Amino acid sequence: MADFVAPLQDLVDQFRRLPGIGGKTAVRLAFSVMEFTDEEAAAFATAILRAKKDIHLCECCCNISTENLCDICADEARDHSVICVVEDAKAVLALERVHDYRGTYHVLGGALSPMNGVGPERLHIRELLSRLSDTTVQEVIVATNPTVEGEATAMYLSRLLKPMNITVSRLAYGIPVGGDLEYADEVTLHRALEGRRPI
């Protein structure tokens, strides 16, 4: 496929840099932007620049925030004795939608992946350990993703935190509602059996 005129091709190339965006989607998004009015295009560009300028990491939990402390860490009604450790800010948003968890979070900023050069020093583990020096924290829930990297991170954190006399638990994973056992992978089935409970 021939390149588009240079400004449009630049726009397509920028969209392709986003995770999960392939060539066809990048072209569709670029053409959608071309249909914006000048005001809409300016608002779109301003939103990107404002997000980059105004959003930073919470100095306590490393979640995204516009203040020194995110809304969750600043909320005195939350249970600060429990920390749920997640890989990224998207996981915080997902868990908050459930409305059942009233503790706090800690965002690692990824998962251990030696193949990709991500070791413990690249994650916000040092900040987590600093938070645990306060005797307020009684439990750490490890809620990393059920992937090879997520499991490796969970095991690493478990070994690191066990000597600190803090309860360390792992978020249970299993068969989704409406799912069929025959289509579940081995890790999901193993997690479902591990997380079984009486009825």
Image (cartoon, rainbow, N blue to C red):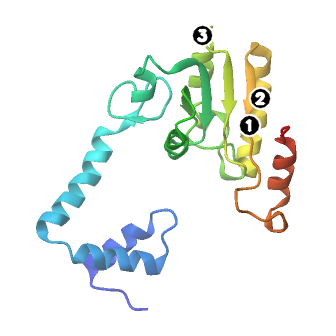
Q: CA–CA distance between discs 3 and 1? A: 22 Å
**Residue at the outermost front position:** 199
Which residue is more in the foreground, 38 or 121? 38
Q: Which residue matches tag 1?
A: 154
Q: Residue at x 48, y 70 (%)?
A: 21
Q: Where 95 falls versus 72 (above or below)?
A: below
Q: In which quarter of the image is the C terminus?
A: top right
- Where does the image place residue 77, in percent across and percent down from the top left? 46, 18
Q: CA–CA distance between discs 2 and 1? A: 6 Å
Q: Can residue 70 be seen in this view?
A: no
Q: Which amino acid does label 3 sit on?
A: Thr
**Residue at the outermost bottom position:** 1
Name the disc covering residue 158, or none: 2
Q: Which residue is drawn at 80% across and 27% down?
A: 159
Q: CA–CA distance between discs 2 and 3? A: 19 Å
- Where does the image place residue 14, in percent across and percent down from the top left? 37, 67
